[in-house]
Amino acid sequence: MLEIADIKTSYGKIAALKGVSLDIHDGGLTCLLGPNGAGKTTLIWTIAGILKAQAGSMKIDSEEILGLKPHQIVSKGIVTVPENRLVFPDMSVRDNLIAGAFSRRKEKGGIEGDLEDVLTRFPRLRERSEQMAGTLSGGEQQMLAVGRALMARPKILLMDEPSTGLAPIIVEEIFEIIGGLRDEGRTIFLVEQNAHMALKYADRFYLLEQGRVTFSGEPGAVDHDEVIQRAYLGARKAS
Amino acid sequence: MDYFFFIDLIQSTVDGLLFGTTYALIGIGFTLIFGVMRKLNLAYGAAALAGTYIGLVVFLMFDAHPALVFLASALGSGLIGLVVYLCCFRFTPSNYPMASLLASVGMLLFIDEVVIHASHGLPYPYPSVFRDAIIELGDVWVRGDLLFVFFMCVVAMAALFWLLYRTPLGLATRAVSQQPRAAQLCGIDVTRVNMMTFGIAGVLGGIAGAMTAAAVGVLSPVIAMGLTVKGLIVVVIGGLGSIPGAIIGGLLVGAAENIFLLLRGVTERDIYVMLLLFIFLTLRPGGLFGSAQTRD
Ligand SMILES: Nc1ncnc2c1ncn2[C@@H]1O[C@H](COP(=O)(O)OP(=O)(O)O)[C@@H](O)[C@H]1O
Ligand SMILES: [Mg+2]
């Protein structure tokens, strides 16, 4: 379990996260919803160790890991599928996936097998495995970004808006992939603008508004329409 | 065009292409560092020359075998590359490119000054191999020492390609230069990759410096400016960030320089090389292999 407590992150003088606390439970899909500019991406980059938090704590299985370098976070098993996918454009699909296993490069074997698994999971990546990643479609790049993260054998998979900028039919496909990963018992933390879709798949969710968690619960127990409205537009007044 | 002029032209081009591989190596060094850090290291040429002097010291003190002298030059330059990284790039703020740029200019002046003082500004003999060997291809002669320079530089490039495309460090280096954020998310330690890149670029610069000196049999402090300026011209022509661009650019500058030398003499040669630079800057500022100007 990843326990995040009272995280504060700012850009210069502008506070983007004003004390965020949330838990990511093992085996399940935890969803973070919220309008544009709420601080969702800032939270992801902070967990990944790329942005420095001014205060707070972050514990994985009770071990404090706030302040570790990004590559150390990855070796703790926390692996990110970033906003805008960020594939390596001038590298083949295969090399992108192998780069995803960089933290495991000293392991004997295993990587080839995982590469095979990812290519089996995403047949479109297998067809294009020698193609440069920059030439893939948006949906394919998203699959590649997910596959690259899986190559690190994550304990917790963080995903930042994987459906943004994709055609509706591709969005369905991406959510089916995410649902599939959840059903395998993986731990996923999904950041989404698309609250409608996310609430269908989430086991738990948090609502982030203006740098604060304002609401949380289980999708079955709340009024979806209100959550969706606040996720898109933000609350009239932050609680 | 009369036959002898034609032969002279071919001869100049061949010599220029062979020697141009040293420019290509320097260009590659600038490009590698720019690739991973998106920053220019202006001390690079001076550091390469200072490394070459470490080889010279080994030569003068121990009368070492040329192979050892070249090796000491390469490793010495790699070591100085690491020092330049630590002094000018490691701790300067990453979102303020001017800081490291100016630090590297300071380093360029400092290294230059040290070299001039240590050598009293005088040229020293530097080992040269296959001086007397000549391969005759009809009326065109291929000089043994230049062929050796060419061979060594090509071997260095081949080793670099092997490193970049066949090793985990190479994969990490390519990842950092294409998408540094994503590289971090893959568990790559970007600071370490940056440092290794300075070391590797340094070794390449040392080889280029050693071969520049070996081609003429002397090592002189004035080479520093040549390495810096030619290296920058090569990356502008090839496209900053592109290794194939640096190779083509190096060969092009080497050949063009020698042809200008033949046509216009030594006093005007550099003017025409600068003119070539000017033409590229105006007509094709991204260079031959102009990689994208932006990233992320
Ligand atoms: N690099 C940055 N510099 C300054 N402010 C930023 C930067 N990135 C994001 N912000 C600000 O931080 C807040 C949160 O942004 P972000 O985390 O990207 O939100 P979200 O992902 O929820 O849309 C916004 O107000 C945004 O303007
Ligand atoms: Mg965002």
Image (tube, rainbow, N blue to C red):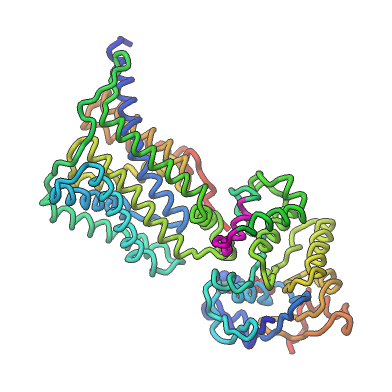
Name the side, left or right, on which B221 lies relative to A146.
left
Quadrant the C terminus of chain B occupies? bottom right
Residue at image location 39% in from the left, 50% down from the top: B30
Specify the farthest residue to the top: B2
Question: Can I make out residue B1 in this image?
Answer: yes
Give residue B250's position: percent from left, percent from top: 38, 37
Give residue B214's position: percent from left, percent from top: 23, 38
Res. B145 image quadrant? top left
User: Magenta-highlighted stretch: main secondary structure?
Assistant: helix
- Magenta span includes A58: no
Quadrant the N terminus of chain B occupies? top left
B75 and B191: which is toward the camera: B75
Res. B159 image quadrant? top left
B188 and A81: which is toward the camera: B188
Res. A21 image quadrant? bottom right
- Magenta span includes A98: yes
Name the side, left or right, on which A39 lies relative to B80.
right
Give the magenta-colored segment's residue range.
A95-108
Give residue A163's position: percent from left, percent from top: 76, 63
Q: How many marks?
A: 0
Name the side, left or right, on which B68 lies relative to B60.
right
Question: Can I make out residue A33 in this image?
Answer: no
Name the side, left or right, on which A95 lies relative to A206.
left
Residue at image location 59% in from the left, 57% down from the top: A99
Ligand 1: give its quadrant: bottom right
